[in-house]
Image: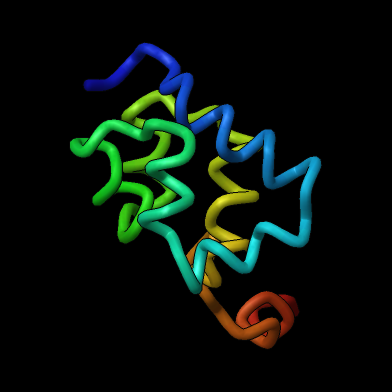
Amino acid sequence: MGGEAPAAIHALIEHLVATPADRTLIQTDIDGLMDRFGVPLEQRAVLRQGSRDELSAIGVHGNYVIKWLIWSKRPTMPFFPISHYFDRRE
């Protein structure tokens, strides 16, 4: 399943880039959104719950991975407090 860019996912995300009002569908009607763009069933679980690395592993472009995670209200990278950086400086 990896390597080849998932055309349906890319089309879906490109639509959301162009149509910001539809981004709420990720929270309210994700199945309908995925149906509209013909996202294969085996990729839907990755869109719903996959990590940055799992999305990349199925071929989603890195820029689209970040957009999707932000719009899905999921972290794009592990959280750490800003003090982590400053506390380490001497």
Q: Position of residue 59 (x, y in %)?
A: 41, 24
The number of discs equals 0
Quadrant housing the C terminus: bottom right
Q: Who's the residue at 75% across and 43% down the image? A: 17
Quadrant housing the N terminus: top left
Q: How is the image coloured?
A: rainbow
Q: In the displayed structure, would residue 54 be above or below residue 25?
A: above
For this orientation, the residue located farthest to the top is 4
Q: In the displayed structure, would residue 4 be above or below residue 65?
A: above
Q: Who's the residue at 80% across and 41% down the image? A: 18
Q: In the displayed structure, would residue 47 be above or below residue 60?
A: below
Q: Who's the residue at 41% across and 45% down the image? A: 34
**Left or right for 68, reference 38:** right
Residue 14 in which image quadrant? top right
**Left or right for 37, reference 68:** left
Q: Say which of 65 and 12 sits in front.
A: 12
Residue 42 in which image quadrant? top left
Q: Position of residue 38 (x, y in %)?
A: 38, 31
**Left or right for 54, reference 63:** left
Q: In the displayed structure, would residue 47 be above or below residue 71?
A: above
Q: Position of residue 32 (x, y in %)?
A: 42, 53
Q: Who's the residue at 48% across and 50% down the image? A: 33
Q: Position of residue 8 (x, y in %)?
A: 46, 27
